[in-house]
């Protein structure tokens, strides 16, 4: 068989696998534009009379803007703190070179071995004690320190290890202190790893359901996934109204993914290679 | 210098290490919503746990789920990665398509497949089977099937994630090695077994550990699709721990569950690391 025919066959096979993978997503999106009757009898057909009514209903019943604001608040602050705290900690660990920094690093690494769910019952008690229940800062703190900190520090440390020491020696000669050296010389060099850590953390924070489920109980603090859970969970018969909720709750991340896909996939790979 | 590590360190000690230690401590008490002042009861919670059929089933499900997930997901991911590594026009588009499900929330994927797999006449999967003349299947209501139905959705969601890591690893393999193997007369299967697979060690060890731990932590998809049912046929360690701790208020018992969970995760990842190291020693 000639090479081009062979490649052609592979392409056909691959298009078929790709299309097969996309069926669930196609099913989800296409049925949001149908009435329930139409969706029941023609689940995979294109909508005959596309309707946006399902979306209007969904936007209202899931309090879309309020929930989205909560999501974005948690996301932005959690990722910001994660990048700041873990880059600083990793720098101190790499440059500290004392017993103390080594011990500190091994303590941080415990977070990679113990899944955070092990802590969850006492964590609840601690959260109550600190007045963190039903507050967005509470969820931000848990997302930062309990779920994502260890991996972020680990990734930053691996990267900072590769930065040549001459960079800082020059800064030291110029009379820069530790903090200034970090912010002026080191931090700008970290942009590739900041992208990796930021992407991995943003995905983890956005898709985290357990923390808001347990720590945000008042409706006005709910995030998108909780709204989905509240509305879709009971699973009533009028299911075409629920499909738009599923779409709306993942749409922001999907849009970001489609725009930044190259960086996101690179970030995932970089996280694995360093790991 | 260490001052810079302080914000992370204080937060980590307060919100991770402290509650983790407390989990171990509380697991030997009778703390519950009804007994806010706990007292020491020894290993009683663990005795209860290991004589409770539902708890044992949950542990067994989590382990079975994680092992099958690890094998299926990585086999598929390696297969797809090797194919996609060929220089095809569509390779990049397909990479995006395969990765896309990983961006969606697990909970949303769970609900989506609950619609697709529903036993009602509108269920897409059963309609499709019906169109080919098959009998409808009770995907989520059959106790022998529910756990595997949930597992299938997670394979769909995460295989692309593992695949992109395998592809990156494949790209780093020196093409001259393939050339050399071909000159020595190796067939495609031999090239894969003797050249490709051993050189995929770094990606494999990472992905295997990730899918194993991810499988053991399984919560969202079960929560969305079956709530552990029918009966407790699809309960996992996590769903049982959350419901005993937060719904039933049996805090200390849930802490004992957390300890068992830690032991399971720890021993299984150690066992898998041991096997991986053996493999690494064998190929180098």
Image (cartoon, rainbow, N blue to C red):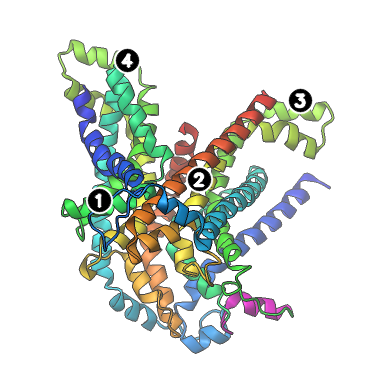
> To which residue does mark 1 refer?
A140
Q: Residue at x 41, y 41 (%)?
A: A114
- Badge 4 element: loop
Instruction: Tell me the subunit letter for badge 4.
Output: A
- Badge 3 element: helix
Nearest to viewer (mark 2 / mark 1): 2
* Screen quadrant of the N terminus of chain B: top left
Nearest to viewer (mark 3 / mark 1): 1
Nearest to viewer (mark 4 / mark 2): 2
> To which residue does mark 3 refer?
B180
Q: Position of residue A165 (x, y in %)?
A: 32, 15
> To which residue does mark 2 refer?
B264
Q: Are marks 3 and 2 on the same chain?
A: yes
Segment colored magenta: B120-132
Instruction: Tell me the subunit letter for badge 2.
Output: B
- Badge 2 element: helix
Judge whether A160 appears above or below B239 on screen: above
> To which residue does mark 4 refer?
A165
Report, in whole angstroms, how far the alpha carbon at label 1 lies from the one at label 4. Answer: 34 Å
Q: Position of residue B142 (x, y in %)?
A: 61, 73
- Badge 1 element: helix
Q: Is residue A41 magenta?
A: no
Q: Position of residue A191 (x, y in %)?
A: 33, 34
Give neighbour class at mark 1: few <14, some 14-19, many 20+ (Cα, 10 Å).
many
């Amino acid at each position: 068989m000639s090479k081009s025919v062979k490649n052609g066959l592979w392409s056909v096979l691959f298009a078929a696998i790709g299309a097969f993978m996309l069926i669930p997503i196609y099913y989800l999106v296409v049925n949001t534009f149908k009435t329930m009757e139409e969706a029941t009898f023609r689940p995979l057909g294109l909508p005959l009379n596309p309707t946006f009514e399902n979306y209007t209903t969904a936007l209202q019943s899931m309090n879309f803007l309020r929930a989205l604001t909560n999501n974005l608040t948690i996301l932005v602050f959690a990722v910001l703190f994660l990048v700041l705290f873990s880059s600083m900690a990793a720098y101190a660990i790499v440059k500290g070179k004392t017993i103390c920094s080594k011990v500190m690093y091994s303590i941080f690494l415990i977070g990679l071995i113990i899944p955070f769910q092990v802590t969850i019952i006492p964590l609840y008690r601690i959260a109550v004690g600190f007045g963190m229940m039903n507050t967005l800062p509470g969820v931000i703190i848990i997302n930062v320190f309990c779920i994502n900190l260890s991996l972020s520090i680990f990734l930053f440390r691996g990267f900072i290890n590769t930065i040549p020491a001459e960079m800082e020696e020059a800064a030291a000669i110029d009379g820069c202190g530790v903090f200034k050296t970090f912010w002026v010389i080191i931090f700008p060099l970290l942009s590739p790893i900041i992208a990796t850590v930021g992407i991995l953390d943003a995905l983890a924070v956005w898709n985290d359901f357990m923390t808001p489920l347990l720590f945000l109980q008042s409706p006005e603090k709910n995030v998108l996934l909780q709204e989905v859970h509240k509305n879709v969970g009971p699973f009533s018969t009028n299911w075409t109204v629920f499909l738009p909720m599923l779409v709306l709750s993942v749409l922001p991340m999907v849009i970001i993914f489609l725009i930044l896909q190259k960086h996101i996939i690179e970030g995932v790979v970089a996280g694995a290679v360093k790991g | 210098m260490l001052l810079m590590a302080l914000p992370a360190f204080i937060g980590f000690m307060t919100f991770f290490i402290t509650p983790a230690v407390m989990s171990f401590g509380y697991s030997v008490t009778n703390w519950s919503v009804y007994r806010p002042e706990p007292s020491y009861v020894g290993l009683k919670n663990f005795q209860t746990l290991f004589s409770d059929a539902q708890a044992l089933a949950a542990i067994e499900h989590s382990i079975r789920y994680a092992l099958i997930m690890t094998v299926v997901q990585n086999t598929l991911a390696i297969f797809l990665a090797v194919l996609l590594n060929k220089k095809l026009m569509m390779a990049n588009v397909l990479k995006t398509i395969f990765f896309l499900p990983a961006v969606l929330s697990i909970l949303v994927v769970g609900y989506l497949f609950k619609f697709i797999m529903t036993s009602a006449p509108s269920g897409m999967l059963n309609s499709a089977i019906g169109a080919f003349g098959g009998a409808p299947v009770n995907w989520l209501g059959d106790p022998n099937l529910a756990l595997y139905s949930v597992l299938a959705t997670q394979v769909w969601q995460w295989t692309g994630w593992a695949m992109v890591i395998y592809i990156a690893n494949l790209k780093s393999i020196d093409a001259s090695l393939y050339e050399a193997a071909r000159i020595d007369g190796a067939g495609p299967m031999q090239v894969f077994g003797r050249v490709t697979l051993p050189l995929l060690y770094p990606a494999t060890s990472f992905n295997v550990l990730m899918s194993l731990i991810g499988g053991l932590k399984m919560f969202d998809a079960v929560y969305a699709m079956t709530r552990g049912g029918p009966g407790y046929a699809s309960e996992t360690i996590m769903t049982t721990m959350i419901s005993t701790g937060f719904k039933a208020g049996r805090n200390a018992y849930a802490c004992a569950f957390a300890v068992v969970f830690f032991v399971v995760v720890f021993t299984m990842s150690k066992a898998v690391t041991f096997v991986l190291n053996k493999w690494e020693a064998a190929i180098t």
